[in-house]
Image (tube, coloured by chain):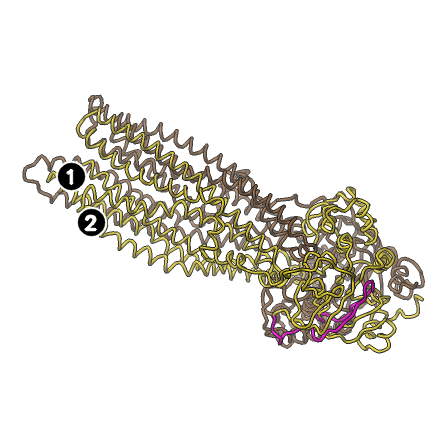
Amino acid sequence: MIKKLSGCIREYKKESILAPVFVTLEVVMEVLIPLVMAGLIDHGIDAGNMKEVGKYGAVLVVFALLSLWFGVLAAKYAAVASAGFAKNLRKDMFYNVQTFSFSNIDKFSAASLITRLTTDVTNVQMAFMMVVRVAARAPLMLIFSVVMAFVINVEITLVFIGVLPFLAAALFLIINKAHPIFERIFKTYDKLNNVVRENIRGIRVVKAYVREKHEIDKFKKTSEVIFKDFSKAEKLIAFNGPVMQLAIYTCMIGASWIGAKLIVAGSLTTGELVSIITYAMQILMSLMMVSMIFVMMTISRASAERTCEVLSEKSDITDPEEPVTEVKDGSIIFKNVGFSYSGDAERECLFDIDLEIKSGETVGIVGGTGSSKSTLIQLIPRLYDVSEGEVLVGGVNVKDYDLHVLRNSVSVVLQKNVLFSGTIIDNMHWGDENASMEEIERACEISQANEFINGFPDKFETYIDQGGTNVSGGQRQRLCIARALLKKPKILIMDDSTSAVDTATDAKIRKGFREDIPDTTKIVIAQRIASVEHADKIIVLEGGRIDGIGTHEELLHNNEIYREAYTSQMKGGAGIGE
Amino acid sequence: MENKERKPSGIKPGKGVKIKGGGPKDPKQTLKRLMKLMEGYKGRILLVFALIFVSSLGGVASSMFIGVLIDEFIVPLTMTPDPVFTGLAKVLTIMAGVYIAAALATLFYNRIMVVVAQEILKKVRDEMFAHMQKLAIRYFDTNNYGDIMSRYTNDTDTLRQMIAQTIPQLFSSAMTIIVVLAAMLYSSVPLTVIVLITAFLMLKLGGKIGAKAGFFFVKQQKSLGEVNGYIEEMISGQKVVKVFCREEKVIEDFDKLNEELCRNATSANKIANMMMPIMANLGNLQYVIIAIIGGMLAISGIDEGLTLGTIAAFLQLTRSFSMPVNQVAQQINSVAMALAGAERIFQLMDEPVEDDEGSVILVDAEYEDGILKETDHRTEMWAWKEILADGSVKYTELKGDVRFNNVDFGYSSEKEVLHDINLYAEPGQKVAFVGATGAGKTTITNLINRFYDITDGTILYDGIDVKRIKKSELRRSLGIVLQDTNLFTDTVMENIRYGRLSATDEDVINAAKLANAHDLIMRLPKGYDTVLEGDGANLSQGQRQLLAIARAAVNDPPVMILDEATSSIDTRTEAIVQRGMDRLMNNRTVFVIAHRLSTVQNADVIMVMDEGRIIERGTHDMLIEQKGRYYQLYTGAFELE
């Protein structure tokens, strides 16, 4: 894990090394300063010698300035290194996510990926900064201070050394006890946030069912757990301060008692006593810092692990060694295809699919909720790999194509489609980076989007909010179709892409397809029979199997499911409109 | 989903509301509110302050003790040829007692304070959530979700730090400063003056650095918000990115934002990191100044009271003094942040709640000798209970008669989206609304259940103005299924039971069967005990809609509103669901909104809407006869060539 993360330091190696180096120098200064202070008291003030006071004072000023300079440099390098590290970490993760296949994304879920790239990265960054700044400081401070204390006086230092293990044990015990509680708290926090999030999003449901009280009780229960756990953990942590104080005070009293005797005996000066007490403080402080690092590290360990999981995830769909770089035509063949999302044969959701679609054909796919219609079409642009059999596009197995080539030729309008924040033109450029205004307008004309776009005050420059929430569902679908058309694909797949469009407009879109892109293979998944009625071929899916293939008339004649769907939609209307 | 209606541009939040601004707008007021919040814990907080006092006395005593040790014991003892240490031992014992008391005081004040802080936080969270539940739908429609969320997370967290850490620390620092100051004044007035001047300069500088760091921190937060926003948007749409092979372009944009964040984070942290060494070394310089001036004063004999021991002690005091001053300087920023956070929390709590002046309530009822009587059990019959001005009670049977009289409505005052709507739904009728997206269909249902209030006209429900009906009772009488299903993290069983909390498992299963969701549920890994997570992310939209219908079915409401409730369900399943619903809602009023004409065909009345007006009304046959808009829409479905 450490190796993986340290790989993100890269061009910030210099800063990452310099930061602890300057921290070390700063610590050296900080350790020397009390010594000079002792000298100032002993040789200057105690001796009543102003010259000495001036001399030691000058040295002290120089040391303080050096310490300041080192400190500032350490601060600077630590900031550069940690910001750079976080940048690289974020970058590496984001780059890797871009290589993910659909199943990689499914495995993590988009929400979890987002947390990993945002909150977790910030946590790891904080830990990194801590490591370069404090991790070097605390142990160094500990060692230097102990050495200096020994130099001044062995007996008193032994008192400190004697106190140390008790303090260390106490701190360790506290952290050890509190840590699991904190981990639990983080989980409860997630739960609490989830309740809030669901309530904000589902407020209409809560209000419609008048469940405000129920939700408040649910929330209170969780917040009660947080209260109890947090109080418990913090009460334990509250021992830290007093334990520390006790240790310091014990050292003080020990040092005073022994120190007084030594001074009286003439083997210690008062100045030395003052500085050895300062060292005692530094020793204990650095131990405290070590314990804090320990806490910080364990807290961010979970985050680090989660980021590493993203870093080491390998895409399960990759380009072949010698990819085919041209899609000849829009023909599609499914040979004996079986598929399961999890990979185990038990939970297959497509079975024995055999299918042949000629280039330029229009194919409709109908089937009940959960009949795996979307799954079927996602195999064509190789968004998922088949578990069994093979899928051929333009006569070549999809696994042999360069992925970009394949996906640029096969344009899918997904069921859960999204627009991105930016103008309508920006969104259209997703289909074709270099599309001219005429081409964009043409595509929007076919998808029947022109009319409403021109109704907006800013026309094609209209800003679309994130997720396209400022246009209606039907408008969003039409924009998504236009975007897909701009790819000028050999195969166009629409997964229930006109469900929110009214029937008349839907018909116009289909008419546009027929007239403007006759050579493109068109696959249409629809609930509405009217949307597929005139297709060259209609596929009826049921429970992951093909239940029937044929034209509208054939299926009406020989397919139960199709006929039922048709009558349910035309019920009561038969004959009147005609 | 008719978002365009729900989020009219006039009241939409600006971009990037999520980003926290610099400082609080009205810190004084916020501070007052915070004080008020802590008032309930006055006793314990006062105790904490007393304990902090004891604890900081210990700290001060230890630094003063050095001087006493040197002047009173060590120096005299060195003078005596035969030193006796019993006096010293006695003093040390007393000191040990003081120290133990101080440590215990620290322990207790910490323990009390963390609990107080957590109690306050729990109170704040609970109150905030309870208050949020009372807010009108408009609030949720016009505020960024992330922005509301962050009040529960980031802002509450800054508040926790403020109460649990900053306040005790500031108080402790203040105590130490005061006591040390007194001690310093006692030792030497001129030296104290010098310390005060230098400390003042240090605080000034600290404040300046803090302000600068704050400026960059705001910039960093803004950048971080942008990067995280970009990550969120792109990863949410990652599948679309893949489909369009946009990986390279997305990476390019990401790099730009990420670089910018790196720059701002570096600037912010650089300054923040420098704070410590700068302040600490200024403390060292202060030490030298005091040593030199003190030495001069003592040696030259200007200040007669200044002994060598006093200077040594005073120098120790100087260090004890600069430490809390440093702490205060460093806390300034976190106080500002906490106040900003607290202000946002109070802002949410001050949001005006959904007003409800209605008093008419809904009760179970039955006819007894021809008179409508209230009962305590479910009778499949409901009555509106009204208490009249003279104190008498009036019962009106709930029939589901809904009338709109000249209703006008706009989400914002500038733009009216419904114009002069007149409609009536007679009891037991199935009323359908059809029309293009944005025609105002959903808005009508938002008005019936009073998610929004009408601008003009009246809505009567069984002859009672809906404004007079208590909102919770009104909504209890209306079952609603929306196109956007919202499920909660819980088992399938509990999600359906949400419709009626008192429903038995059997009721739930029956409802699921009625909604044709039973088979799909049985196919889930643990059937009804399967826990749905992330709004039922592992179910398809159609499956989620079936669950939402089951939830409404278990509610078994007198009146039902189905707003595109079956839009993602295939028509065959839809027909089965519809048959079930028809049976359930037999003789009850149902409102149906749909694009799909097959969904509405068998309605008793169909209203065709266009641009906020009802342009046609009648039965399917009548409307076909009319050869108007409905006819056009309908024949569009047949599409003869």
Kindly identify the residue that appears in the image at 26 percent across and 42 percent down.
Answer: A279
The residue wearing badge 2 is A158
* Marker disc for residue A268: 1
> Distance of mark 2 from mark 1, alpha carbons?
15 Å
Which color has been applied to chain A in this rendered view? yellow
Which color has been applied to chain B in this rendered view? brown
Q: Which residue lies furthest to the left in this view?
A: B82
Q: Name the side, left or right, on which B387 lies relative to B600.
A: left
- Residue B616 located within the stretch drawn in magenta: no
Position of residue A269 measured from the top left corner of the image (x, y, whole percent): 17, 37
- Residue A355 located within the stretch drawn in magenta: yes
Q: Which of A388 and A440 is in front in this view?
A: A388
* Marker disc for residue B531: none
Kindly identify the residue that appears in the image at 35 percent across and 50 percent down.
Answer: A290
Q: Is residue A477 above or below residue B545?
A: above
Position of residue B33 measured from the top left corner of the image (x, y, whole percent): 50, 44
